[in-house]
């Protein structure tokens, strides 16, 4: 028979083990979900305030830019519009609104993932740098191409105002973009290769960040998001290259590594139609098939369809992981889409298009 | 162990564990409520109701604490199990078990807070999901109710009030 002391010791040890296990499990659950409760509820509330199809339809009825500005006063864009009266000023307001959304996400999300939104903002740096350098090379006024969004807007503006191409190198000094620009100046790479290099830097940063997350769920969501974005970029590059009749080897130089797709066979086909057929067997096949006819005329139809697919996929992840970074990703994609549609709407209203025509152009859901 | 140690531990675990879990649960749901209200004040009422759900476990813990203390006559008379007899040890161990049951099942307040937090997010996006949000969060309550019923049976049949 066991003595009382032994029995008590066994009981105490058992309780100790049970409580330690319970404490550890509870800590893990709290560590994982608690930091998302405030931001995700706030983001969900923000999502409810995104412009509905009906509201966009009403905005399309504005007929004049002045009326549109008055109608936009009822939306969250009011805070960014100030005294905007022209198309350019309104577009700048939209860009400031989007930039503030990225920064808000960085602010409210847990530290372990918030840096991802700072990195996403860098895509606008890449776009700005590429646009400014292209405009300078073509001898156009580069200032017109600067978007008020990104992490280095003042530098980009200085680049646009630079008198010489060498001056831009000084401005880019210390950034990851210095080396590709130096090679471009020395004519060691072409403008297309320069742009690809910028995107490779951007996507490699995103992917490194995503795959270095400690939490498996975050790694999975961010990893899938970045890889899908890379796949979309590569598919569009491939299709545009094929539409322009470029050889596979030439297109390969513009592809970004890190995606899930193997494009070797699609690169070696003759034309756009065959490239679309090759993509049929990939996971993006059903999406591409749904816009096949339009895609043969205009590749941007594939881009729109793939962006919708990404939005839908992130939406699924949001439903599966409600307290995760997927909610923020889904919101930012919706916000970007809303901004694109509003930008188009502003231009169309300013150009005097009829409300019916505007509704038909900016989205199927708005068509009468 | 002395009977008084079993009884005290049982009462403390019932109220302590369940109370701490409720605090975490309300904390998680409260943070979500603040997020929803920060964007739109109209979310306040719905968020408040959902936020309050994980509080019930602490009430169960408190009820159990009183029942244990009453049953052992720590409240309302002299302590019943002063003598270190096998019968007293068994009865005080039953009270300890009852407290532990409510304390452990009261931990359901933490997942309930997480569910309520997700529910607040859903309601902020679409107010029509309020009832569903309540139902989902209330599911986690079942475990705490089972625990309380189990503890009541243990106290009533094993020791008596």
Image (cartoon, coloured by chain):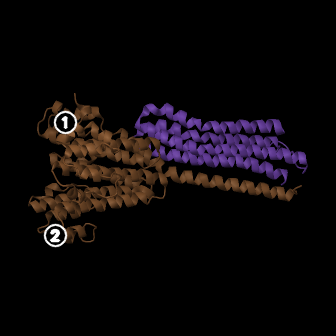
Up/down of A183 relative to A100, above or below: below
- How many residues crowd around disc 1 within 10 Å: few (fewer than 14), some, or many (20 or more)? some
Mark sitting on residue A361:
1
Question: Does the image show residue A75?
Answer: no
Q: Which residue is mark 2?
A: A185
Ranked by sequence position, the earlier of labels 2 and 1 is 2
Marks 2/1: CA–CA distance = 40 Å
Task: Residue lying at the far top in this picture: please name it.
Answer: A368
- Of all chains, the one bearing label 1 is A
Crowding near the residue tagged with mark 2, few <14, some 14–19, many ≥20 C-alpha atoms within 10 Å: some
Give me the chain that's purple.
Answer: B
Front residue of A70/A318: it is: A318
Q: Quadrant of residue A76?
A: top left
Residue A151: percent from the left, percent from the top? 29, 60
For the N terminus of chain A, give its image quadrant.
bottom right
Q: Secondary structure at mark 2?
A: helix
């Amino acid at each position: 028979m066991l003595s009382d002391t032994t029995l008590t010791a066994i009981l105490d040890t058992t309780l100790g083990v049970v409580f330690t296990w319970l404490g550890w499990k509870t800590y893990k659950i709290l560590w994982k979900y608690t930091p998302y409760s405030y931001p995700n509820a706030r983001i969900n509330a923000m999502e409810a305030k995104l412009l509905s199809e009906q509201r966009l339809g009403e905005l399309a009825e504005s007929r004049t830019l002045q009326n549109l500005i008055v109608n936009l006063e009822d939306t969250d864009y009011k805070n960014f519009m100030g005294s905007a009266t022209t198309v350019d000023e309104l577009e700048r307001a939209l860009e400031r609104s989007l930039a503030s959304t990225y920064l808000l996400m960085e602010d409210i999300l847990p530290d372990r993932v918030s840096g991802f939104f700072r990195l996403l903002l860098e895509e606008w740096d890449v776009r700005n740098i590429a646009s400014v350098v292209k405009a300078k090379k073509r001898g156009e006024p580069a200032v017109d191409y600067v978007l008020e969004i990104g992490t280095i807007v003042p530098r980009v503006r200085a680049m646009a105002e630079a008198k010489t191409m060498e001056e831009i190198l000084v401005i880019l000094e210390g950034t990851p973009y210095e080396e590709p620009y130096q090679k471009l100046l020395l004519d060691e790479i072409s403008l297309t290769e320069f742009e690809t290099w910028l995107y490779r830097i951007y996507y490699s940063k995103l992917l490194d960040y995503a795959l270095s997350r400690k939490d498996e769920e975050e790694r999975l969501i961010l990893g899938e998001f970045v890889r899908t974005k890379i796949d979309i970029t590569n598919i569009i590059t491939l299709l545009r290259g094929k539409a322009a009749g470029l050889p596979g080897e030439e297109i390969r130089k513009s592809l970004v590594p890190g995606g899930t797709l193997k494009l070797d066979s699609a690169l070696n086909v003759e034309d756009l139609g065959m490239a679309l057929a090759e993509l049929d067997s990939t996971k993006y096949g059903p999406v591409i098939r749904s816009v096949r006819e339009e895609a043969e005329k205009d590749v941007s139809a594939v881009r729109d369809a793939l962006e919708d697919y990404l939005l839908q996929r992130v939406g699924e992840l949001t439903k599966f992981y409600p307290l995760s970074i997927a909610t923020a990703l889904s919101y930012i994609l919706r916000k970007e889409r809303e901004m694109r549609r509003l930008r188009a709407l502003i231009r169309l209203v300013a150009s005097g298009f009829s409300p019916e025509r505007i509704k038909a152009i900016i989205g199927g859901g708005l068509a009468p | 162990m002395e009977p008084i140690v079993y009884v005290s531990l049982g009462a403390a675990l019932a109220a302590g564990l369940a109370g701490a879990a409720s605090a975490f649960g309300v904390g998680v749901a409260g943070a979500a409520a603040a997020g929803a209200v920060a964007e739109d004040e109209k979310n306040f009422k719905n968020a408040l109701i959902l936020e309050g759900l994980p509080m019930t476990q602490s009430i169960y813990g408190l009820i159990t604490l009183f029942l244990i203390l009453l049953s052992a006559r720590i409240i309302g008379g002299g302590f019943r199990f002063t003598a270190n007899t096998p019968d007293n040890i068994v009865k005080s161990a039953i009270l300890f078990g009852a407290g532990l049951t409510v304390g452990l099942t009261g931990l359901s307040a933490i997942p309930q807070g997480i569910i309520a937090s997700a529910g607040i997010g859903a309601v902020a996006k679409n107010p029509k999901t309020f009832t569903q949000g309540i139902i989902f969060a209330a599911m986690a309550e079942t475990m705490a109710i089972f625990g309380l019923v189990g503890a009541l049976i243990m106290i009533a049949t094993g020791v008596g009030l």
